[in-house]
Amino acid sequence: MKPQHSSQRDFPGGAACGMRKKRREKMLDASDVRLLLLHFIAQGAAHGYELIKSIEELSRGEYTPSPGIIYPNLTLLEEMECIEIRDAQASRKAYSLTAEGQRQLAEYQPNLQTIIGRLGSMAVLVNNRSLPEVERAVNNMRTALNTRLSQASLPQQTLYDIIDALDEAARKIERS
């Protein structure tokens, strides 16, 4: 039995379920993960750990879905008849795509490209953020801010000046 999908939020491009990841903000929801799983399984039969590593590589290690996200979504995809176990006797379940999985993957290709782009941009961010000059400047800002804000009684005008300086720096970065 195949579930009915009433909107894009149902599968695979919606934004409903949270995930555990290295970054604090929400990067992918469960439907995004299912679409990525279909994408990687379409490239060749794979088991859960390989799929986790494939998703992690897209973001250069900045996002790693937990087994608690991957395996339930694999089960759901199997129940939706999008994937099937290649060899039920193997010690690790390797999944392959079914015709329904191929159909879903084709239908949601624009969503997939958006998700891959988002994870790819994280890889660029990791590279640029790790430039020594950027790291030094960020650390200098953090140290100066922490040193100043750790004082017990800051005058209101000083707080306003700090906030203005941070806002101005943010504007310059945004417009650069």
Image (spheres, rainbow, N blue to C red):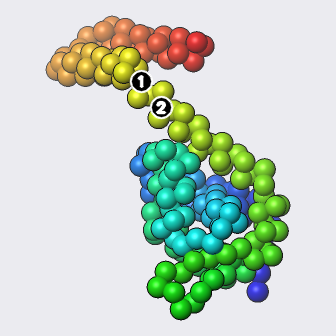
- Horizontally, residue 108 falls left or right of residue 65, namely right
* Residue 161 in picture, x, y percent from top left: 37, 8
Neighbour tally class for label 2: few under 14, some 14-19, many 20 plus, Cα within 10 Å? few
- Amino acid on which the number 1 mark rests in the picture: Leu
Taking 85 as reference, is 57 above or below it?
above
- Give the quadrant of residue 103: bottom right
Q: In which quarter of the image is the N terminus?
A: bottom right
Q: Give the percent coordinates (x, y) of residue 156.
A: 31, 12
Vertical placement of residue 67 versus 123, above or below: below
Q: Mark 2 points at which residue?
A: 127
Contact check, label 2 and label 1, Cβ < 8 Å: yes
Distance (Cα) linking label 2 and label 1: 7 Å
**Furthest residue in direction bottom, as rendered:** 89
- Dividing the picture into quadrants, the one containing residue 77 is bottom right
Residue under label 1: 131
Give me the residue at 31% from left, 22% from top.
139
Seen at 57% across and 61% down, the residue is 17
User: Mark 2 is on which residue type?
Assistant: Asn
